[in-house]
């Protein structure tokens, strides 16, 4: 475009009252026909015939070219629903007083411009509160091609304005409701959320409308912001057409959702550890202490375990080549199942390719519509997914609350089958189930009892046999466990009576319809089990490390509770937990922040997982770094809930 741009503005009035206005930025060659089209538009406005039309044409100089915000449409049915969504969107973009901001909307009614509101103090910042701040000198880079001159196109104008506004210094968001009584669609915009259309945000016939620009920054910068909004020439490129097939928006929607997560401190990524599983790894070329591995007994790289895997690969191949029921069962699979049953003390066992599948597979096989499941509110996602997939009614009882559990189960006598399921060790809290009481309640109401020993196998009980050994009680009907944590390999298993295992083999879809785990993983798990049986002192060392680490934390006033090798350190705020994890990584400790949806919103935490092979020095240094990190967090702008003084700590556990 060598043709210089001209700004063309039209406004029309009748008896001194504004009835329409529009603007374009077009090359000189299109200036006169654009001006004429805008005059036509003024003359044919629904609000009446104007007695005054002004057209202003100015050379605009080199404009700033900005890519349009992504566009996503949320379908709402009522104004109340639309407003509630606007609040949610703003809140998710880190705007704390979203509700209060929506209330201020009433004030913007009747203004020609927008309210400029301090997003944090809610003070109005416009020099002229009656008029507000008007964003102007902007256009769609492709407006000529789109031929939108003839009449008002709410969306086409709004996406251009919203884009310009979001690039103004200090602006962090915008909310808009049309003042056209019949136009009920509005939007919320932020740089990261993009332009979120809300199909119904006000009642039809309501003439109230307006705009709020949300500002965050020093007062001294406000004039600069207003100057940008009112004077900076902007053309907006790549404006998505609403008439584009829905398909054209499908990736923008994904991007917007990712941005939403990013903004809430909830985005996730995979770190590449340049090392075998173990207490030490290399990350970006640096050595870090790993305090987050589930390889509790350091068996994943044990030479006996890796040799078994290598040997099995040579002898039986890398992959099994089929499902267990067709061609995928090889001698290592049979041997491992016998070994697991003997280890756990049950009649039989069945392995799955992953622990997730073992949970989903057992639950969906045992219960269906017409049955009921009692599930602890903090059960692992794989249990929850199994429950949902089964089609059974699900009753969630309060975490580890055996009174609530019994009360709910007692009301389920009329169901065909009852299944009670709980983690043995809760993966994000580290506490354990009161198994004897759980089993007693199950027996009383003839419910199947199932526990997930993913974090209990190799950890609880003097010889690592799990919660039944620790509690010295009977087995539940179904003992689920994993090969992927203390056993250093991968896969999941169910240990149970012969009849139950036969039933699963015949009905459990994840078992029937997935390829069997390869012999190397299976043989590795088998070898790890042999090591565990021969060296129960590994379990004792792990226990000692847990004791040492919790005592070290207590020295700094950080009180934690655990019944396992998982030590949660509560933080609360998601972004703060992430910042803390980053800080610890800088200090050389890999300890992840666990956030929603893995745990409840606002219950973010650091999750330490200990290994038998951590050295006392590492654990002491980690505790010191955590204490330091929490102390630093405390001095930050938003106070941390965890104070170095344990007496004041908020304890969600
Ligand atoms: N700068 C600042 N505020 C403005 C401007 C401007 N250039 N133009 C209008 N406003 C304020 C003013 O208070 C109006 O009352 C209010 O915004 C609404 O303006 O995706 O039509 O032109 O389908 O009525 C949004 C949804 C339509 C579009 C918005 O706004 C879609 C609309 P209106
Ligand atoms: Mg309007």
Image (cartoon, grey):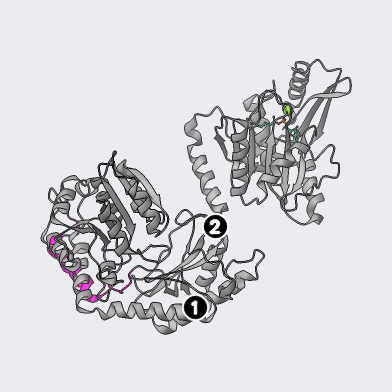
Q: Was residue 307 drawn as part of the magenta stretch in this picture?
A: yes
Q: Quadrant of residue 48?
A: top right
Q: State the image coordinates of residue 24 (x, y, percent, origin top left).
A: 73, 30
Where disc 2 sits, the SS reads loop
Q: Which mark is residue 553?
A: 1
Magenta stretch encompasses residue 133: no
**Residue 74 seen in this snapshot:** yes
Compared with residue 472, is residue 245 higher up or lower down, i.e. above or below? above
Ligand 2 positioned in quadrant: top right
Is label 1's Cβ within 8 Å of ligand 1? no
| Residue 327: image location, x then y, percent | 12, 50
Q: Position of residue 335 (x, y in %)?
A: 12, 63
Residue at x 72% of width, y 43% of height: 213
Residue at the bottom extreme, as displayed: 617
Q: Is residue 358 visible?
A: no
Query: x, y (%) of residue 331?
Result: 10, 61
The magenta region covers 295-322
Q: Which residue is mark 2?
A: 602
Camera-side residue of 507 and 7: 507
Pick the front one: 245 or 212: 212
């Amino acid at each position: 475009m060598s043709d210089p741009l001209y700004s063309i503005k039209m406004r029309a009035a009748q008896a001194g009252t504004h009835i329409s206005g529009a603007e374009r930025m077009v090359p000189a060659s299109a200036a006169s026909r654009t001006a004429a089209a805008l005059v036509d538009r003024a003359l044919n406005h629904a609000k009446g015939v104007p007695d005054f039309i002004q057209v202003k044409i100015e050379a605009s100089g080199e404009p700033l070219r900005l890519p349009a915000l992504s566009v996503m449409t949320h379908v709402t049915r009522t104004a109340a629903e639309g407003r509630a969504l606007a609040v949610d969107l703003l809140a998710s973009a880190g705007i704390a007083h979203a509700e209060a901001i929506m209330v201020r909307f009433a004030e913007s009614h009747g203004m020609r411009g927008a309210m400029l509101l301090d997003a944090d103090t809610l003070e109005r910042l416009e020099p002229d509160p009656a008029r507000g701040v008007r964003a102007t000198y902007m256009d769609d880079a492709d407006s000529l091609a789109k031929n939108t001159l003839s009449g008002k196109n709410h969306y086409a104008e709004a996406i251009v304005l919203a884009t310009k506004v979001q690039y103004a210094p200090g602006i962090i968001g915008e909310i808009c409701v049309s003042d056209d009584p019949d136009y009920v669609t509005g939007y919320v915009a932020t740089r990261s959320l993009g332009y979120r259309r809300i199909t119904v945000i006000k009642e039809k016939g309501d003439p109230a409308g307006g705009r709020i620009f949300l500002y965050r920054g020093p007062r001294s910068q406000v004039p600069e912001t207003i100057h940008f909004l009112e004077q900076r020439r902007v053309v907006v490129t790549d404006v998505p057409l609403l008439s584009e097939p829905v398909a054209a928006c499908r990736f923008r929607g994904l991007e917007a959702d990712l941005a939403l997560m990013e903004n809430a401190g909830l985005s996730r990524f995979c770190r590449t550890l340049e090392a075998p599983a173990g207490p030490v790894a290399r990350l970006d070329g640096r050595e870090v202490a790993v305090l987050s591995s589930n390889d509790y007994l350091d068996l994943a790289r044990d030479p006996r375990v890796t040799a078994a895997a290598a040997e099995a690969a040579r002898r039986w191949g890398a992959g099994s080549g089929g499902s267990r029921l067709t061609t995928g069962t090889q001698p290592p699979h049979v041997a491992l199942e016998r070994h697991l049953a003997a280890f756990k003390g049950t009649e039989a066992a069945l392995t799955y390719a992953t622990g997730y599948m073992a949970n989903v597979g057992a639950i969906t096989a045992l219960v269906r519509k017409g049955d009921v499941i009692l599930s602890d509110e903090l059960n692992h996602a794989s249990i929850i997914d199994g429950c949902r997939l089964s089609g059974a009614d699900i009753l969630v009882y309060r975490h580890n609350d055996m009174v609530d559990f019994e009360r709910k189960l007692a009301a389920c006598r009329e169901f065909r089958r009852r299944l009670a399921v709980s983690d043995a060790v809760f993966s994000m809290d580290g506490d354990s189930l009161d198994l004897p009481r759980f089993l007693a309640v199950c027996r009383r109401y003839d419910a199947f009892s199932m526990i997930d020993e993913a974090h209990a196998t190799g950890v609880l009980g003097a010889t690592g046999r799990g919660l039944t050994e620790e509690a010295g009680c009977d087995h539940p009907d179904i003992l689920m466990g994993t090969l992927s944590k203390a056993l250093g390999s991968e896969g999941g298993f169910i240990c149970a009576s012969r009849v139950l295992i036969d039933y699963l083999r015949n009905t459990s879809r994840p078992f029937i319809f997935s390829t069997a785990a390869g012999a190397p993983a299976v043989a590795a798990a088998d070898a790890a089990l042999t090591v565990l049986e021969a060296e129960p002192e590994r379990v004792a060392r792990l226990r000692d490390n847990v004791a040492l680490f919790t005592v070290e934390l207590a020295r700094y006033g950080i009180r934690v509770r655990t019944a396992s090798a998982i030590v949660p350190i509560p933080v609360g705020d998601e972004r703060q937990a992430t910042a803390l994890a980053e800080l610890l990584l800088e200090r050389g400790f890999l300890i992840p922040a666990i956030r929603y949806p893995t745990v409840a919103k606002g219950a973010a935490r650091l999750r330490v997982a200990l290994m038998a092979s951590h050295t006392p020095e590492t654990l002491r240094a980690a505790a010191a770094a955590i204490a330091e990190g929490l102390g630093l967090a405390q001095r930050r702008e938003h106070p941390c809930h965890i104070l170095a003084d344990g007496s004041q700590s908020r304890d969600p556990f």
